[in-house]
Image (spheres, helix red, strand yellow):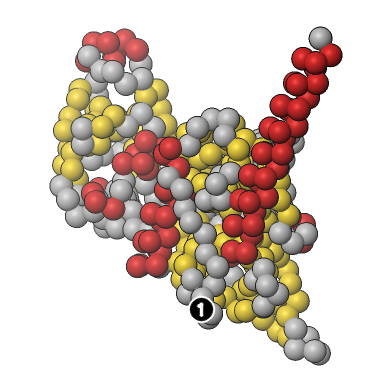
């Protein structure tokens, strides 16, 4: 009996040692790329320094100084100070910003910097180790560990759009962690830490690495993400069950059109106020969030069909979505 207990203790110790070694190795690989981002006043003090008024985290993803962070860390800011892991302090410039996914790219004028390697976030498994690195409350390069708690979560951005396919983790995040990397035990970045639920314990979220890479590439190319829009104001509304059954509809909700923007894409169509949109192209649209997801860049300038309920009839209405218009579907 005592021998069995002793063997079990040895096995547990070996597992803990292996876990510790994996975490240490991952941190050694990722931490040199993690930066602290300070938002500072434009005016300089008597000693030439700028007074910080906010801070967050980020990480270098190209050796020539491109940094990924959260949009809410740098959005609308013009004076950005980036502190590297080796102690250097550099001025940062916003390359591109996408509040709808809470991602931004910042550049510093430097070369041969340590940079991260991205993992494929589609291959993540619930329960695998997750390691967060950042600067919570100004404590530089703090490390917390946990697991991937769930996949495919959604969270609403400050713009009102849903950020889809988020990673939920219990690796603790605090103010200042925003924009820092969430890494695997192999030392690859699996996500960008973005939010926590303040009253809860261990419910934190990160934007998946695949989304981050796609958005970053478009921000580098265009400075923003271009999305389609119809130029309407709408709200979610239920479709009565009896009506859905009579018309053979598989949806239980849609978007009621409250207003149509003058000169917008929908204004040249036969869409009317009061219509209920229940589909876009071949896809159902049961609410505003569905329509947002379907308004991708590739629909811009292309004739598409809205499936609409009007006076208990189903209509097919052609529209040609235009480029992004802020805060309008």
Task: From the top left corner, tell me how far across and down residue 225 is, in percent.
Answer: 38, 59
Q: Please determine whether, in this image, residue 117 is positioned above or below residue 109.
A: above
Quadrant location of the N terminus in the rendered image: top right
- Secondary element under disc 1, as helix, strand or loop, is loop
Q: Please determine whether, in this image, residue 11 is positioned above or below residue 229.
A: above
Residue drawn at the location 19% of the way across and 55% of the way down: 301
Would residue 109 appear left or right of 261 to someone viewing this image?
Answer: right
Residue drawn at the location 47% of the way across and 67% of the way down: 62
Q: Please determine whether, in this image, residue 111 is positioned above or below residue 245.
A: below
Task: From the top left corner, tell me how far across and down residue 122 is, in percent.
Answer: 42, 39
Residue drawn at the location 78% of the way across and 86% of the way down: 45
Residue 164 appearing in the image: no
Residue drawn at the location 18% of the way across and 43% of the way down: 304
Task: From the top left corner, tell me how far across and down residue 22 is, in percent.
Answer: 63, 44
Q: Nearer the viewer, residue 92 or 27?
A: 27
Would residue 299 appear left or right of 114 to someone viewing this image?
Answer: left
Residue 144 appearing in the image: yes
Residue that extends furthest to the right in the rendered view of this protein: 2
Circle 1 Cα neighbour tier, 10 Å, few/some/many (<14 / 14–19 / ≥20): few
Which residue bears the numbered disc 1?
Answer: 111
Q: Nearer the viewer, residue 264 or 173?
A: 173
Q: Nearer the viewer, residue 286 or 107?
A: 107
Task: From the top left corner, tell me how far across and down residue 186 is, in percent.
Answer: 55, 46
């Amino acid at each position: 009996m005592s021998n069995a207990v002793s063997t079990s203790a040895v096995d547990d110790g070996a597992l803990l040692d292996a876990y510790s070694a994996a975490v240490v190795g991952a941190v050694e690989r990722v931490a040199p790329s993690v930066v602290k981002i300070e938002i500072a006043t434009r005016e300089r003090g008597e000693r030439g320094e700028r007074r910080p008024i906010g801070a967050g985290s980020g990480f270098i993803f190209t050796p020539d100084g491109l940094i990924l962070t959260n949009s809410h860390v740098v959005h609308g800011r013009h004076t950005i100070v980036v502190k590297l892991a080796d102690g250097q302090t550099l001025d940062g410039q916003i390359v591109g910003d996408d509040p709808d996914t809470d991602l931004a790219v910042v550049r510093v004028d430097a070369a041969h910097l340590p940079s991260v390697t991205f993992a494929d976030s589609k291959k993540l498994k619930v329960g695998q180790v997750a390691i967060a690195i950042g600067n919570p409350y100004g404590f530089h390069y703090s490390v917390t560990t946990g697991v991937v708690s769930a996949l495919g979560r959604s969270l609403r951005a400050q713009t009102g759009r849903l950020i889809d396919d988020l990673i939920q983790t219990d690796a603790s995040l605090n103010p200042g962690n925003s924009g820092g990397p969430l890494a695997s035990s192999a030392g690859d970045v699996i996500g960008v830490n973005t939010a926590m639920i303040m009253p809860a314990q261990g419910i934190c979220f990160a934007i998946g690495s695949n989304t981050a890479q796609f958005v970053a590439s478009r921000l580098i190319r265009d400075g923003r993400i271009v999305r389609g829009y119809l130029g309407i104001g709408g709200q979610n509304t239920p479709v009565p069950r009896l009506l859905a059954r009579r018309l053979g509809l598989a949806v239980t909700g849609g978007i009621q059109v409250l207003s149509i923007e003058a000169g917008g894409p929908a204004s040249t169509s036969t869409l009317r106020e009061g219509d209920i949109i229940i589909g876009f192209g071949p896809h159902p649209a049961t609410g505003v969030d569905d329509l947002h997801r379907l308004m991708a860049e590739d629909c811009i300038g292309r004739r598409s069909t809205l499936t609409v309920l009007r006076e208990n009839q189903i209509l097919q209405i052609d529209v040609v979505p235009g480029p992004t218009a802020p805060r309008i579907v």
